[in-house]
Every structure is written in structure tokens, then in C-alpha cells.
Image (tube, rainbow, N blue to C red):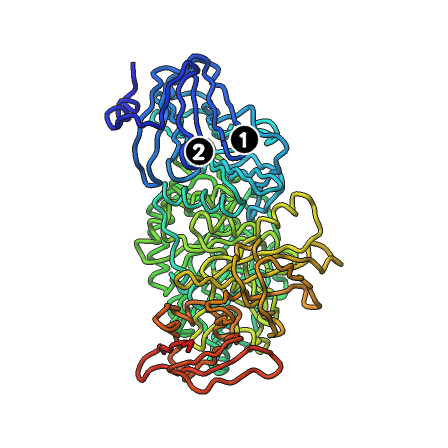
Amino acid sequence: MVSRFFSGFLAASLSISASLAQSNKGLEIGPGSNGLRVSLNPASGAYAVRSDAFDWNLTGQLGTPAEHAMTHNGRDSVGRYAEIDFMWRPGTSVTCTIRKYDDTPVVWFRAHYDHPMNGSGVKFPYFNSIPIGLNAFSYQDRTFSPPTFGLAKTATPWLLFDGNAHSLVLSPASNFMLAAMTGTGSSEIGVEMANHLTRVPEGFNQDAVMVISSGIGATWDTWGATMRALFHKNTPANDADPTLKTFGYWTDNGADYYYNYDNTLGYAGTLVNLVDRYREEGIPLGYLQLDSWWYQKSTFDPAGHAGGAKKNNRLPIGSWNRYGGLMEYRAHPDLFPDGLSIFQQRVGLPLVVHNRWIDRTSPYHEQYKISGVAAVDPKWWKDIADYLKQSGVVCYEQDWLDQIYLNSPDMASNPGLGDAFTAGMAAASRSDGLSMQYCMGSPRFFLQGLNYSNLTTIRTSGDRFEPRKWADFLYVSRLAHDVGIWPWCDVFKSAETGNMILSVLSAGPVGTGDALGRENKENIFKAVRADGVIIKPDQPLMPTDQTYIDGAAKSQSPFVATTFTDHNGIRTRYLFAFPRSKGENRGSIRLRDLGVSATSYVMDMLYGHGRFVEPDDWMPLQIGKEGFTYLMIAPAIRPGFAFLGDTSKFVPTGKQRIASIMPNASGFRILVRFAPSESSVTLRCASRVQFAVKGSEEIVQGTGVPECYSFKVKPKQGKRTAEFILDFP
């Protein structure tokens, strides 16, 4: 008997298109414009995905014949598709789908369980023959999902690629709290449910997505766009909440006021004094983060093991000064005798607040449904979200996610329980207008974030950002970007120029944790406008294709990552490079390898000099005493002319400063944004040709910088914008 699920497919099916064929070997779809084809032989149970472009074949076996196999066309949130549907009966009814999209190199798989099944279900898709000799990359099932040039058997995408950047990504596409990858990567790959699952319920869906394309970054982009489309996830704007829009102050691990304060002022007084100092200095803060020190905790770790009575032995004893789990999610009265709301009013800043796991001895276990150390009760989430809203909090940071998962074992064995934890958090936060940040997430939490529009940021680096964490941060930022979440590098000190540049280029939060009087105004104001708004690129800084290839080969060439701003097709790129190991400070690159096909002006952002470069010219990457090099690659928008923007900032053409660049009859119309207190902005260009600037003050040629010119623009009367025209007589 055909299942209700399968009957629904039949009812919705359209006529079979010309791209579908039924041969004596079975059913085949493709290849179509993307060069992919999928096939099923019902008699043998063999199924396959083939890329004609790369001559790649992946084949799998059901182990039994497929029943009721047929094809049809349709459309979903990803696009138009053709698919093969069939029934597979390894002991119980499973309905399967292999769906190939028409206009994107994507194949989607589903195993639908028509009836309950004991155990962890089937492996599908599972290919026991794949292209040989490919490099492997994935994310480990550990804190912050560190990258590995190997394959981790968790809910993570697997990337396989060759030396020409021909690439394949396969990942789970549903039930991320239970899903896992399987196989060796050298001879087999597949998707399954974690072996902790003891029973698959009726109606359960096990989905997967495969992308095969040219270019590692392009394949990641397609995978991410597909996943976001399937989950209807729109990436939040890069100024969606105060943590994304403005410069902030952090008190987490690595900050000077992490479990530390001025003994004469107390914790609250120290932070009030610091905020007042920043205001006196004219340094704009958009928010203040309170880390795990602010609430009441036990002395037990996530597994219930006893720890020390004090986090900082130099400070007074108290349930706030502990390492352990959450006892009560309220501001500790020893630190905030008037409550969190009164403190927030005193500092006059929105708050970002941290949370850990719920301790096994917390009274919350008697009041709410707690699984292990995780709240799965919507009422608990609503109660804490209401408290935070009343206290002036704008963002809730859930830390220790990997440990919460490991120490709440029912999440991995009880379908829906992990979703209750994350969905309860998201729903309560959304109802009270709070955004969320994930911290210490394993890969499954990145993918789980596809479900939640108010999850705006996620930590992609270990505690206390520093150069030895740069590479991991950039690889994991790729994953965050693809699932529609902005990466956060963690706290650092404002005098650390490399950390500041990378934080800005992440297009995520920028926050420092200096002790009072140690702030570096110069670096801060290279990152932000006078009102604290971060001037940032359009997307996070991410590794180049060659960086993946060199990483797999264990090459010692510099690690290279890029990002961009795009103004109506005028794309300015930003390149950051640093050594993979000590002593390896040289490399070279061509603009064409970065996707630049026209003459551009390349400016060294550390020293201010630059030159016009052709796309096929080899450009040296020489890393100096700073330990990194940072370049802006500005396209020649007219032969011999490049617009450089506000070069006093780390991202001169960020849209928070340069709102738009629009072609007009004689040149380009440029719109500039200002902070309320800014009376003028000096902009720069590089030119070998005659030009004029209409709507600005005098053009001045740079001294010591050939071909560079600067000019000043002022906002219109009563407005925060200015418009001028670059004219080419």
C-alpha cells in the first residue's frame, strides 16, 4: 500500500519533463544546465549522482529493490526541480526522494519514516563508491566547532575537493540535534541519525543536501543559499541589533574586568565609572556585556563534578564568584543591591547578558521541566526573557552549548527534545524583542540556527581573540555565514590592531575589554564613526579557495582571506593575510585568483601607499613586523581612476560611510553618511586622468603618494548625508 506521504507527492506531481528518461536501467534525471544527473535502478536498488563536468560518480545501494519508483517535477523554496520518489523496505516502510534542482547544482534527499522503526534508522543517502583522491574538510564535534582537514562524524557539512577547487558539500538538512555524517570520505560518505537514537518515530524526516560545483567558496555559497532557502532563513542585516551595529564593551574571559573589579568601587561601580570615562573621552559605546559573573552559580561543572569555591581568589566569596552552573538567573544582590534594572539605568546602555547550563542542584528542577542541564520548558524561557526585558537587556547570550548537549543525553536520543531547548529560547527571546547569541556551539548548533531569525550572532573563536586563533576563526566564520548568522571573534584589547581589523572585517560585533584608562581611541575610531556605528564590509572575511587547497597540502604559504563591499556592481575587496607558521612571511597572488578581472588600485592599508595592478600581475604578499598584511583592492571605475572612500577607516567603502555609488551620464553619483556630530569627511581617490568633484571642497593631491587625491565633503544642512558627483570631462 502506498503511504499517505507518497500519495501526497502523487497528487501534487506535474507532467514528466523532457529531461526525465526511463531506460532499461531505471530512472534518470538530468543532466540539465548544471551538469548533474541522478538515477535509480528500481530492480537492483542502486542509485547514483553524477557530475558530467568533473566526471565524478557517486553510487549507493539500498540493498533491496525499490518499489513504486516514479519521477515528477515541481518547485519549492530553492527552485524548480525534478525528482525520483520510491519506497524502500528494510524491515519497515521508508519513503525516499532524490530531488535534483534545475538551475542550481544541488541534490536534496529525504528518507520519510511511514511507521516507527527501532534503532537509529537507515543511512540515506549513503554512497559506497565516490571519486577518489579528494581532500577532506569539516568541523569537529567540539567547543566552537574547530575546523579539520578530515571528516568529523557529527551534524556538520563535509567538504570534498581537488586541487582545481572542484568541490562537493554534503550535509544533513533536518533534525540537526539528532543527525550525523557517516563514512570515511575516501570510499564512502552518507547521512544518518546518531546512534544514541533508539527509536525513529512515525512521520520522521531525515533530509540531506549535496552540492557539486566549481570553486570551493562558490560551492559553500550554494550550499548556504540552499539551506537558508529550505528553512526560509533570511540573514539578519549586519546592523540588526546593537551588538552588530555599534561598538561595545565586553567583560567575558580575556577582558580586564572578567571576574575582576576595583575593590574601592565594587563591580557595578567599576563599570559605571568605566562607561563615564568613555563618555568623557568621546568614545561611543552602544551596549555593555555582562558575563557569567553577574548571576548566582554553584561549584559544580556541567557533569556534576565539584570544583573550587572561588573563581577569583582575590575577590570576596559569594555565589557569583564561582565556576559552576546556574542556580538562579537573577542579578546577584552582592553586586547589584538595587537590581539589574537600576544598574542598567545608571550606565545608560543596553545590556547583553550571558548564561550557562542549569546546575543539577538548582531549584529550577522543581519548578520547570529540565532535561539534564538544559531547560526544555517554554515557561522557564518566558520567565527569564521577561526579566531580561524589564532589565534593559537587548541580547541573550547562551554559552556552553556543547556541554549542555553532552550533559543532557536525552537530546541525542529523544526526537524533539533538543528542539524544545533551542526553540523555547528563540520563541521567548523573540516575544520580548531580544536577539540571541550562541557560544561554544558544536556544528549541530550552527545548523540548528537556520530555524531562528533572531539568532543574530555566534562565537566562531575560542575565548580571548588572538593571532593563534585567527585561522580557526576564519574557517568557522564561513560556516556561520552560510547558515545566516554573523560571526563574533570574542573580546580583545583595543590597542591590538590586527585583532581590531579582523573583528571589523568579520562584519559581526566589535567589542573590547580594556581596563579603565587603557583604551586606544585611534584604533577604535578606525573601526567606527563618531556615533559608534561600525563601518564594515557586506559579508564576513572568509578564506580563499587557495587557502583551503594549501591547508590540505600543509603548505606554508600565507593564510589569505577576503571580503568586499558592493555598490551596484562596483566591488571593493579587502584582503587580509598572515603566516601559517613562524618565518613564512612571503607569498604572492594574482587579482584574477580573487575574482578580479579588471585593473584595480591596490592600497596597503597599514602604510597608505598603493598602485594600479593588472588582473594577471603577480602581487607580492609580504608580511612585516605587524604579523599580517592588509590590502584594499579598489576597482578602476573608469580607466585610470579608482574611488578609495574614507581611508581613515579600516573599511573605507563600508555602507555605513559610503551609502551608494551610482553611475550617471558623466561619471558617478556618490552618497555619504555621517554621524550626527561629524561636520565633514575627507575622501580619497587614485587617478591617472583628469576628473572633477562636484559638491565638495578643494581637491588636494597627496604628498608622497603618487596618483592619490583627497577632497572634503560636508553633510547637507539639517541632514546626515552628503551627495557629490565624480565627473570625467
Distance between the alpha carbons at the discs numbered 2 and 1: 22 Å
Count of numbered labels shown in the rendering: 2
Of the pair 284 and 686, the residue shown nearer to us: 686
Label 2 vs label 1, nearer the camera:
1
Q: Secondary structure at mark 2?
A: strand
Look at the image and tell me in which quarter the C terminus lies: bottom left
**Residue plotted at (44% across, 33% down):** 208
Q: Is residue 32 left or right of residue 431?
A: right
Q: Dot 2: few (<14), some (14–19), or many (≥20) neighbours within 10 Å?
A: many
Q: Which mark is residue 208?
A: 2
Q: Which mark is residue 249?
A: none
Type of amino acid under label 2: Ala
Residue 466: x percent and y percent? 63, 60
Residue 452: x percent and y percent? 37, 48
Of the pair 577 and 122, the residue shown nearer to us: 577
Q: Dot 1: few (<14), some (14–19), or many (≥20) neighbours within 10 Å?
A: few
Q: Which residue, given by chain and number where applicable, does mark 1 sit on?
A: 55
The answer, for residue 430, to whether it is visible in the render is yes
**Residue plotted at (46% across, 55% down):** 486
Q: Secondary structure at mark 1?
A: loop
Q: Are marks 2 and 1 in contact (CB under 8 Å)?
A: no
- Residue 376, relative to residue 130: is it above or below? below
